[in-house]
Image: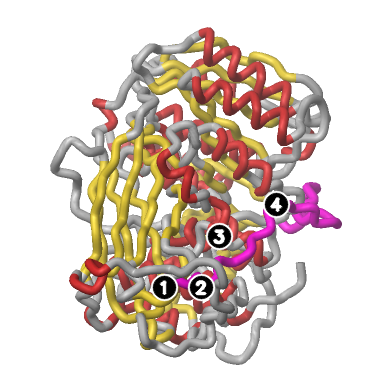
Amino acid sequence: MQKTSLLLSIFFLSVKLLFAEINGIEVTGTVYDAVDGSPVPGVNVLEKGTTNGAVSDINGAYKIFVKNESAILVFSFIGYTTAEIVINSNRVINVNLQVDNSSLSEVIVTGVGRGLFRRRSKGALSYGVSVNDSYNFQPRFNTEGYTAIDENEFLKVTKNPLSTFSIDVDAASYSNIRRFINIGQRPPKDAVRIEEMINYFNYSYPLPEKEDPFSIYTELATCPWNEDHNLVHIGLQGKEIPTENLPTSNFVFLIDVSGSMNSPNKLPLLKSAFNMLVENLRNEDRVAIVVYAGAAGLVLPSTPGNNKAKIKNSINRLTAGGSTAGGEGIELAYHIASENFIEGGNNRIILATDGDFNTGPSSNAHMESLIEKKREERVFLTVLGFGMGNYKDDKMEILADKGNGNYAYIDNLQEARKVLINEFGGTMFTIAKDVKLQIEFNPVKVQAYRLIGYENRLLEDEDFNDDKKDAGELGSGHTVTALYEIIPAGVKSRFIKSVDSLKYQRSLVKEESYNTNEVMTIKFRYKAPDDRKSQLITNYISDNTIDWRNASINFKWSAAVAEFGMLLRDSKYSQSTDIASVTQLAKDARGEDDEGYRREFIRLVESSKFLSDEK
């Protein structure tokens, strides 16, 4: 008996040693900021002298497999002093990184590298940077494309009493900006869409109580970056529909497998992201897969969601190569979606690409025309962007807008989980379409106003009552936030431009404007997903201005994000804003942050002072 026990002990010890030899020693831990003790996401953890590495997640946690106990772990992140720690017999190593207050000595790629590899052990995944990989992660020439943004200016109420715009729930700009900052570069100004930065985050607005698909929240306070001005905060909260109660989905995954996707932060990351989404499918949902390179083809016919293995196998077999017939791929995807159309269901194409359409019918006009036609047939389009260097943000933003869908940029698996799992209902299911806002300002209370962001979403005043005019969509559980900076009546400001008096007409202010405490009236129009006629909601804001220091967490956080966006754009309206004031305002407004997104934002702000202007 003792001999048998001894043999078993030797056997298990041998297996353990063999396992360690093959898979390495597992080391885990959490990276913290040495000053305030908060977790630091996006830190590179590299086994010194090797290409073996990992990246800390949103909670600062990491996991890495090293060869032996003499290995040295190197912890590095932009804005922090690099730390080196010998493993020895430790299996859990928590690290406190010191802030580097002198200068940025090296730029570290976080989340993805010139080669992002994956190794599996005990069911765990470890992601790291492979600096000697054959992939060329950073192309020699940067051909990224962004739509030019002319920043909204202050408008006099007497000349422009109405402000009309479409909502925007896209968040691609924020994660794209994060990508630039994490590799030590200042993002291009036109990549910074402030409304998308603000709407990346969730806000604690009251849930709808009536039949309307969303509730309305407003707040008026002094402006943090100019206390002579006021800031108006407008928030919408979409009705939350549990995933199990969402209508059945008819998905078509439209995946770019052209040569430009042959990079670790493109097709491999894309596959992992879509495998996440497949896990979230219900039995009654259906998925087809269309791919395009030099030509478009059907990889998987419409398949029930309970056949997850078959769907995943189709995804995992994909390889990249060839030119990019994006227009042909979109046409085929809509054809497949129409063939499998579910009446009363969620019929949606999910396009995943770097946006580099270079062959076939790929002109913006052609694709926009097709997408506009199909949205009237109730097939919507969601766009997921991947990669860098040749990334075509301008084209993908247009496609998502025209397709009654939303647009996200996936720079790492954490972002994929946020978009495709945590916010599945909001990303994939529309509860209200063509949502527009029109604000009328009271000239007795307001001298001038400026809508912060939404430059690409402005509408003509006449468009508000035109039900044929396309506008933004609101998803299940989504929040939408908009900010107006206003100059109260009687306040002198260098931002108000003088205009000569009119010779042939004059503007009259109605008497009732003097007899009301209303600062503005807000009108909302929206349609149910299957309706063609809009519904109208009217609200107003009274002149109950509070000091911004006493404002809500919602107000302060949105203001902090807006301030940072203005700094990244070198806005002439940033006024007294600087990195220190943005950081402090954000820290004061962090509130509940279970997923760590707000902590991550604060890290980005603090790191941005080290940014290089090289592109």
Q: Residues within 10 Å of mark 4 (few under 14, many from 20)?
A: many
The image shows residue 517 at horizontal and vertical percentages of 20, 71
Q: Which mark is residue 193?
A: 3
Dot 2 or dot 1, earlier in sequence: 2
Q: Residues within 10 Å of mark 1 (few under 14, many from 20)?
A: many
Magenta highlight on residue 351:
no
Q: Are marks 1 and 4 in contact (CB under 8 Å)?
A: no
Query: Bounds of the magenta span?
Result: 131-157
Inspect the image, locate mark 2, and give the three-letter code of the amino acid beneath it. Answer: Phe
Predominant SS of the magenta segment: loop
Q: Is residue 182 above or below residue 222?
A: above
Inspect the image, locate mark 3, and give the three-letter code of the amino acid beneath it. Answer: Arg
Say which residue appears at 25% left-offset and 40% top-offset.
Answer: 239
Dot 4 or dot 2, earlier in sequence: 2
Inspect the image, locate mark 1, and give the three-letter code of the amino acid beneath it. Answer: Glu
Q: Quadrant of the N terminus?
A: top left
Q: Are marks 3 and 2 in contact (CB under 8 Å)?
A: no
Q: Are marks 3 and 4 in contact (CB under 8 Å)?
A: no
Say which residue appears at 51% left-offset and 68% top-offset.
Answer: 87
Inspect the image, locate mark 4, and give the three-letter code of the amino acid beneath it. Answer: Met
Q: Is residue 606 above or below residue 275?
A: below
The image shows residue 168 at horizontal and vertical percentages of 46, 49
> How far is mark 2 from mark 1, CA to CA?
8 Å
The image shows residue 332 at horizontal and vertical percentages of 65, 16
Q: Secondary structure at mark 4?
A: loop
The residue beneath circle 2 is 154
Residue 47 image-quadrant placement: bottom right
In the image, 527 versus 241, the foreground residue is 527
Say which residue appears at 57% left-offset and 44% top-offset.
Answer: 119
Q: Quadrant of the C terminus?
A: bottom right
Dot 1 or dot 4, earlier in sequence: 4
Q: Secondary structure at mark 1?
A: strand
